[in-house]
Each structure stands twice: as structure tokens, then as C-alpha cells.
Image (spheres, grey):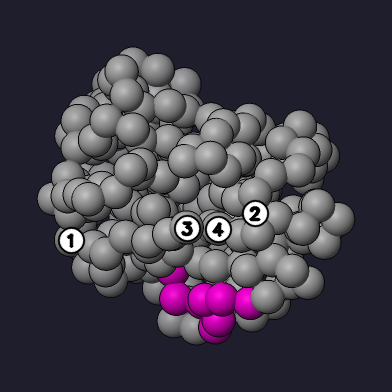
Amino acid sequence: MVSDVHGNGRDLATAGDGADALVCLGDLVLFLDYADHSRGIFPDLFGVENAHRLVELRTARRFEEARALGRRLWGDVERTGGGRAAVIEEAVRRQYAELFAAFPQGTYATYGNVDLPHLWPEYARPGTTVLDGERVEIGGRVFGFVGGGLTTPMRTPYEISDEEYAAKIEAVGEVDVLCTHIPPDVPELCYDVVARRFERGSAALLDAIRRTRPRYALFGHVHQPLARRVRVGATECVNVGHFNATGTPYVLEW
């Protein structure tokens, strides 16, 4: 099981070795690597120095200044005849071509908040099942999948309202393993100790865990959480890890 792949196609190609299935909890795209500012779509377009500046502003939660920087840089692109959406989509397509090709047969995947869901049908090959607000049986256990993130000042591509997210959680219902991109709204699961901020977790997800009592609730999104594992009632809530940095999948056995 992997999450927050963020362009790590090399390790993704072997992540499912020896497993009956590979589960991916989203964020395939690498827009900007906060650990290495030379990697990603943003520095490819605008250079490392601008990437340094954007990370500084976002880390300081100076989001309006970060957006102003983005508007200035993208304005230069648009004045030379390109469109922001088209330029980003072209770059994402190049990443998706590599990453979906790395998925083995028997992959089950949902979207992260930085993904572009409308492109996935073009790249998901036979043997890769994409689920969002849906459930499937894997190895005799029922898995539910809910993708995307909640709205934030970061304005990443696949952020949805609390109401829409809660509806997808409700559609999944009772499962053995509840797989999401974002964590439940538990402070120690949502706080990133390196970025020094809380990421948004879902209260609806936490309510569903308490109510339906899945054996596991698995997620990613928070790259360096204060706690990677917390028990909520009968449920083990586990951050499966920042795959871009570790290259190591989380293994679930039964």
C-alpha cells in the first residue's frame, strides 16, 4: 500500500512485488518537492529560486503572497501564448504516463488532492481499478475508497466540500478496511512536524470510523505526521507513509 507517490515511479514499479494487490491512496503528481526544490512541475517551469520562494511563503502560511507570486509567474507564461491549465495538464500527462505504467496487475487506486481525476481513465490500464466513494472485495475483505481532499487555502486541484466528501463516506458504508487519501480529524494524525502546520482531516471520516468500526482506516496526505498510528475505538488508523520520500510500501497482512 502506498500514498503520496509524487513522481516516484522508480520505487512504484516494485512496490507490489510479492503482494496479492497494490493499493494506492493518491497524490501521484509532483508539483513541487518541499525537500528538493529542483524537482517537480513548478521548478521545471519557473526555476529553483522561485521554487525556494514559494516554499518559504507557503511554510510561513503567507498564502496571499504565495498566490501573488504564482499570478506573476503564470502571467509571464500566458503572455507568451500558453494557458496555465494547458501547461499543467501537459506536464501532468507526462507524469501519469510513467506512473500508471508502473502499476502492476491487481492495483486499486483512488485520487489524492493534487491529482487530476479527469485524466485517470486515459492512463489506467486493464488491471488497475480506480475507486472513489466505492467498495470492492480484496482477498476476502471489503475495502472502501474515498479520494480527494477538503478545501484549503492551498487550492490544490482535487479539493471538494465537506458535504460532498461526507456523501462519499456515507456511500461506502460499513467495510473492513477504509482507505482514504486524507486522515480522520485527529490532531496528532493531521499535524505535520516538518511543515509545522495542521493539514485538514475529515470529521465525517472520524464519525464513520466511530460508527462503523472498520478494522483498519488507512490514509496518507500528511507527510511527516506527529503520530503515524492512532487507535480510535476498535479501529487502527494508520498513515501508510510518504512514498515519495521512503520508497517503501506499507504492508497489510491477514
Above or below, comparing residue 33 to residue 225 in the picture: above
Mark before the other along the chain sequence, 3 or 4: 4
Mark 3 and mark 4: Cα distance apart in space: 15 Å
Which mark is in front, 3 or 4?
Answer: 3
Q: Which badge, 2 or 1, comes first in the chain's sequence?
A: 1
What type is the residue that disc 4 sits on? Leu
Question: For the residue marked with disc 1, what is the amino acid?
Answer: Ser
The residues tagged by marks 1 and 3 sit, at their Cα atoms, a distance apart of 40 Å
What residue is disc 2 on? 152
Q: Which mark is residue 254?
A: 3
- The answer to which of marks 4 and 2 sits earlier in the sequence is 2
Dot 1 corresponds to which residue? Answer: 38
Is residue 155 shown in magenta? no
Q: Nearer the viewer, residue 240 or 159?
A: 240
Q: Amino acid at mark 3?
A: Trp
Q: Nearer the viewer, mark 1 or mark 3?
A: 3
Work out whether residue 126 can be spotted: yes
What's the residue at 22%, 68% (across, down)? Answer: 36
Query: At which x and y percent is residue 39?
Result: 20, 56
Mark 4 or 1: the one toward you: 4
- Magenta highlight range: 223-230
Q: Earlier in the sequence, mark 2 or mark 3?
A: 2
